[in-house]
Image (tube, rainbow, N blue to C red):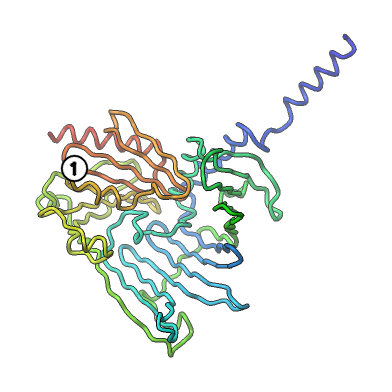
């Protein structure tokens, strides 16, 4: 027995010294630390995502100047040809989108162009910063941290992926659809993502050609559509939309919205813009146009900015019978992978949701309903909710 004791002790010591970064708690902590370090380091970014889905191949090119500028190109590969079919660009609260459409009567393809102005500044609403690959800003890194800490994403190992050391993350057992993500161990940016949709259908996203902090080039806004798509003979159909979000100031907003605005202070941020919106005057969506709004219903939007980071807050009158409108706008509950929790009473019982690439918080304080999106950590969202609760209590 004594002869076995020393070798056994050496074996146990060696096992303790073996790096555990290939999986488990250590790798989990490494990924969280990496994502936290990357938060706030990227002011602009460009990259490409190639998607394979059931034999179809798509390519997306992204250029982003945070917090509110981007250019996006979507290409379709078919019959050995690559065709640009969607170009979208946003500058502040104005958006321009051009898409190649097929004539339902069998005629020639045409360009459908949307010019959208005065967009309400709230992420994930389908218009403002509505890219499902909004990668590189603080919101992306912090949403990933929240999903890992919440147990929805598990760090399952490290492997060489096309010559790059990558952490492998997988959605927790029991969550559907299944998802796997590989993050570059040096940058925290995604290299590959797989989404299993059942019946042997796996959608694969490959990310490449990342360039961090390039100069976000100034280009004409809006651009010349026919030069983009290279067909001067193509028919163009233009639709103009107005989100009915008008700039104002906090001092005068109270009379417009019918309640006292709650204006928080966030370390490192300053109030950059204030908007009042009459959704009944908007033609952004058919559902909104068909909605019967309460009399004099208005929305207040606050935009707080700290460098390339931004936080957006919507405040509107709370009406229990009308809450379906505000709770459906920008909801992340339909995203493929989410983590949800409710903060405590000191935070007004706010609901917090993290999805891949984005986060949101909702709460009702007295007669005001609020929704918050932006470049904050989960802890900063909770701290903001506490502050908003205190502001509401002190105003009554």
Looking at the picture, how far across and down is residue 363, in whole percent? 27, 39
Q: Quadrant of the N terminus?
A: top right
Figure check: 296 above or below 108:
above
Q: Which of the 4 image quadrants contains residue 227?
A: bottom left
Number of other residues with Cα within 10 Å of mark 1, as a class: few under 14, some 14 to 19, many 20 or more: few
Indicate left or right for 165 with 58 as reference. right
> Whole-percent x and y of residue 59?
55, 67
The residue located at (14%, 36%) in the rendering is: 395
Quarter of the image for the C terminus: give it: top left
Q: Which of 285 and 37 is in front in this view?
A: 285
Q: Residue at x 53, y 58 (%)?
A: 212
Q: Residue at x 82, y 18 (%)?
A: 8
Compared to residue 306, the image places residue 172 above or below, namely above
Seen as rendered, the residue at the extreme bottom is 233
Along the line of sight, which residue is nearer the eye, 359 or 319? 319
Say left or right for 279 vs 65: left
Q: Name the residue under label 1.
A: 320
Q: Is residue 243 left or right of residue 257?
A: right
58 vs 212, nearest the viewer: 58
Count of numbered circles in the view: 1
Residue 328 percent across, percent down from the top left: 30, 50
Instruction: Give the SS element for disc 1.
Output: helix
Q: Does residue 213 appear left or right of residue 262 in this picture?
A: right
Residue 118: x percent and y percent? 26, 64
- Considering every residue shown, the one lying at the far front of the view is 199
- Judge by depth and name the residue closer to the eye, 52 or 49: 52
Spot the residue most to the right.
3
């Amino acid at each position: 027995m004594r002869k076995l004791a020393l070798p056994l002790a050496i074996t146990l010591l060696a096992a303790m010294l073996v790096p555990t970064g290939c999986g488990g708690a250590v790798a989990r902590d490494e990924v969280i630390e990496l994502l936290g370090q990357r938060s706030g380091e990227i002011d602009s970014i460009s990259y490409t995502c190639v998607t394979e889905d059931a034999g179809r191949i798509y390519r997306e090119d992204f250029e982003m100047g945070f917090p509110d500028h981007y250019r996006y190109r979507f290409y379709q590969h078919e019959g050995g040809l690559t065709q640009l079919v969607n170009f979208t660009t946003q500058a502040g609260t104005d958006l321009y989108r051009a898409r190649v459409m097929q004539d339902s009567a069998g005629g020639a393809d045409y360009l459908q162009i949307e010019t959208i102005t005065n967009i309400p500044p709230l992420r994930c609403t389908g218009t403002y910063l509505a890219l499902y690959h909004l990668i590189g800003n603080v919101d992306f890194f912090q949403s990933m941290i929240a999903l890992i800490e919440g147990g929805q994403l598990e760090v399952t190992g490290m492997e060489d992926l096309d010559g790059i050391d990558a952490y492998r993350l997988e959605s927790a057992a029991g969550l559907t659809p299944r998802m796997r993500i590989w993050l570059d161990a040096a940058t925290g940016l995604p290299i590959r993502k797989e989404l299993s949709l059942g019946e042997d259908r796996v959608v694969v996203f490959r990310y490449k050609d990342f360039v961090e902090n390039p100069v976000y080039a100034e280009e004409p806004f809006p651009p010349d559509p026919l030069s983009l798509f290279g067909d001067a003979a193509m028919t163009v159909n233009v639709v103009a939309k107005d989100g009915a979000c008008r700039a104002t100031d906090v001092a005068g907003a109270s009379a417009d919205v019918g309640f006292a605005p709650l204006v928080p202070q966030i370390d490192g941020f300053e109030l950059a813009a204030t908007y009042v919106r009459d959704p009944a005057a908007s033609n952004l969506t058919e559902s909104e146009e068909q909605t019967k709004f309460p009399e004099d219903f208005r929305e207040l939007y606050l935009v707080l900015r700290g460098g390339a980071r931004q936080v957006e807050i919507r405040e509107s009158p709370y009406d229990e019978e009308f809450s379906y409108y505000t709770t459906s706008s920008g909801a992340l509950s339909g995203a493929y992978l989410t983590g949800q929790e409710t903060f405590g009473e000191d935070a007004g019982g706010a609901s917090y949701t993290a999805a891949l690439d984005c986060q949101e918080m909702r709460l009702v304080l007295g007669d005001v309903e609020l929704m918050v999106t932006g470049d904050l950590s989960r802890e900063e969202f909770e701290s903001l909710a506490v502050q908003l609760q205190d502001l509401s209590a002190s105003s009554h």
